[in-house]
Amino acid sequence: SNSGNKEITWMMLEAGAETDVVNSVGRTAAQMAAFVGQHDCVTVINNFFPRERLDYYTKPQGLDKEPKLPVKLAGPLHKIITTTNMHPVKIVLLVKENPLLAEVEALQKCYRVLDLICEKCMKQKDMNEVLAMKMHYISCIFQKCLTFLKEREDKLDGFIKSLLKGRDKDGFPVYQEKLIRESIRKFPYCEATLLQQLVRSIAPVEI
């Protein structure tokens, strides 16, 4: 059963299974799972981000006096990083429901850490483009949250309203579409295959 596979996949990852090892035909586990149609497993693998990898940023590194991420923000940020529902409204709601996260200084620290993780995902030998793109995307949403927190009376509620508002003629959420496209456009690693695929599939489509 699919759900069983999902649980097992998660347990294996928790136990430290390597997600980037290739099999005899040069495919990773996620590629194999996709190949045989196990998309739930693909989702679990691609969204897996061990808590230790985040906790690294809660300790001062090198000459830093302060850690880049306050310990109290690691849990709430990890919850957002590992969520599989990437709808922008869902992410803003996760920020909004956590008073620790929903403030300017916290979000600034979080988005900078996400950018660092994104860079690491792209620079390491076992490059993970999916995770890099995800970190960048969440970082972009955090940065938009900041704009609304600083400039708008209705703060994050105003952001959610903008995301949900449909245009008059057909109810299409234009603001949301523009936000997602802009985040793809701002992805700093333009040589990424995933990025090129996304751009190729999205660019010709009129909003």
Image: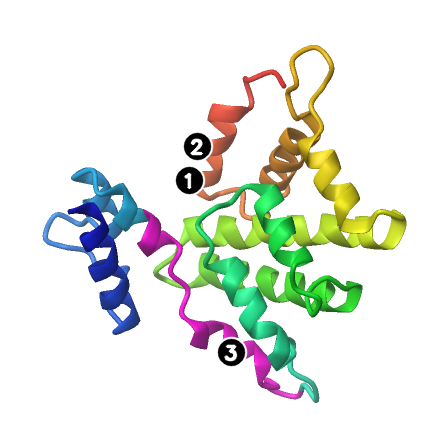
Residue located at (26% from left, 50% from top):
41
Q: Which mark is residue 197?
A: 2
Left or right position of 48 against 156:
left
Residue under label 3: 55
Please tell me which residue lies in front, 98 or 189.
98
Please tell me which residue lies in front, 76 or 19.
76
In the image, what residue type sits under mark 2? Answer: Gln
In the image, what residue type sits under mark 3? Answer: Asp
- Kindly state the secondary structure of the residue where label 1 is placed: helix
N-term-proximal mark, 3 vs 2: 3
N-term-proximal mark, 3 vs 1: 3
Could you tell me if residue 28 is visible in this image? Answer: no
In the image, what residue type sits under mark 1? Answer: Thr
The magenta stretch is: 43-63
Left or right position of 16 against 173:
left
- Does residue 205 lie above or below 16 as drawn? above
Picture coordinates of residue 38 (x, y %)? 22, 43
Picture coordinates of residue 79 (x, y %)? 51, 63
Residue under label 1: 193
Residue located at (25% from left, 74% from top):
15
